[in-house]
Amino acid sequence: MNLFDIPGHLRDEEFFESLLPERGILIERIISTGQASPTGFWYDQDRDELVMLLQGEALGRTLKS
């Protein structure tokens, strides 16, 4: 599998593809085409996450207190 191969037709939502199913760990490829969380949104989840950006750019946002 080539992680840089982009599916021919991407929808308006992010594209999720599980790379190692059923191994006790979730490893997935996510292709975003400009999607962003709403301003002030805080995404909180029960498990740890490691994100690796392989191509493009990302902007980090912080919440105002």
Image (cartoon, rainbow, N blue to C red):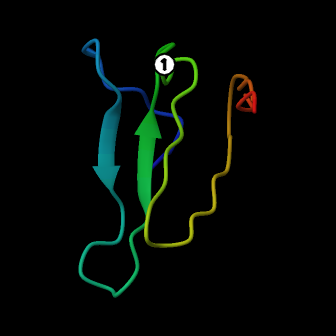
Which residue shows up at 30% across the image and 48% down it?
A: 17
Relative side of 31 to 56, left or right = left
Q: Residue 27: percent from the left, percent from the top?
A: 43, 65
Q: Is residue 58 placed above or below 23 in the rendered structure?
A: above
- Where's the C terminus, which quadrant? top right
What residue is at 46 percent from the left and 25 percent from the top?
32
Task: Indicate left or right for 34 with 59 as reference.
Answer: left
Please give the name of the residue rendered at 50% of the width and 44% of the height, measured from the top-left corner: 3
Q: Quadrant of residue 14?
A: top left
Q: Secondary structure at mark 1?
A: loop
Estimate the x, y position of residue 44 in percent, counting from the top left. 49, 54
Vertical relation: 4 (above or below) 33: below
Identify the amino acid type marked 1. Pro
Residue under numbered circle 1: 38
Seen in the picture, residue 56 relative to 15 is either above or below; the reply is above
Q: From this viewpoint, which residue is outermost toward the front?
A: 65
